[in-house]
Image (cartoon, helix red, strand yellow):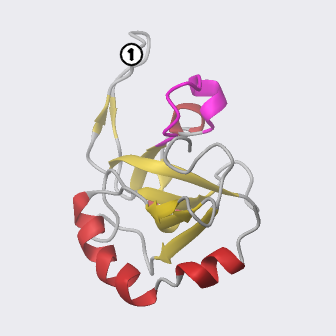
Amino acid sequence: MAPTIGDQGGTLLVRKLPTADPMRVFVGDVVLLKDPEKSDDFLVRRLAAIEGYEMVSADEKDDPFVLDKDECWVLADNDKLKAKEANDSRTFGPISMSNIVGRVIYCLQTAVDHGPVQNSHFSMRKDSPVLEVELDVEEMAKNHKA
């Protein structure tokens, strides 16, 4: 998820969602999701489209399609990766919204390199009060594995 999360990863603060639906998670959000190909693993990807969106490929051989109810499309932020390297919806296709565990709201890479993750403006507005009240950067840095 470089450059959003950084090449070296980091400690992420994830706001767990009781259910992932279009009223709780929005296009543009960075989400933690169950890997659709390896059920014991998780991925961090940006939500690019939700149910009802028409998906059109740059490859003219691919037919456009509309995401069904409870489906979404996720993408890696790293533009330098080819589609096959990114391990996102360009590889495994649409995923169920139920695969989304939560929204990534804060990233700590080092004790001095940390901050909120840039999500949709809807989520940033919802998550700001949580960060103000709940976030303890010193505690997070103490438990961070560099």
Amino acid type shown at disc 1: Ala
Q: Residue at x 52, y 84 (%)?
A: 136
Is 20 placed left or right of 89 in the picture?
left
| Residue 8 position within the rendered picture, expressed as x and y whole percent measured from the top left | 69, 48
Confirm whether the magenta stretch covers residue 84.
Answer: yes
Residue under the point 23% across and 60% down: 121
View extreme (front): residue: 112
Q: Can you give x and y, in whole percent of width and height, for residue 65 in the image?
A: 34, 32
Residue 105 at x, y = what percent? 44, 67
- What predominant SS class does the magenta segment belong to? loop
Q: Residue at x 62, y 84 (%)?
A: 139
Q: Please say if 30 is above or below 124.
A: above
Q: Which part of the image, by quadrant, shows the C terminus?
A: bottom right
The magenta segment: 75-87
- Decide if residue 1 is on the left or right side of residue 41: left
Q: Give the residue pinned by disc 1.
A: 58
- The answer to which image quadrant residue 11 occupies is bottom right
Mark 1 secondary-structure assignment: loop
Residue 14 in the image: above or below residue 41: below
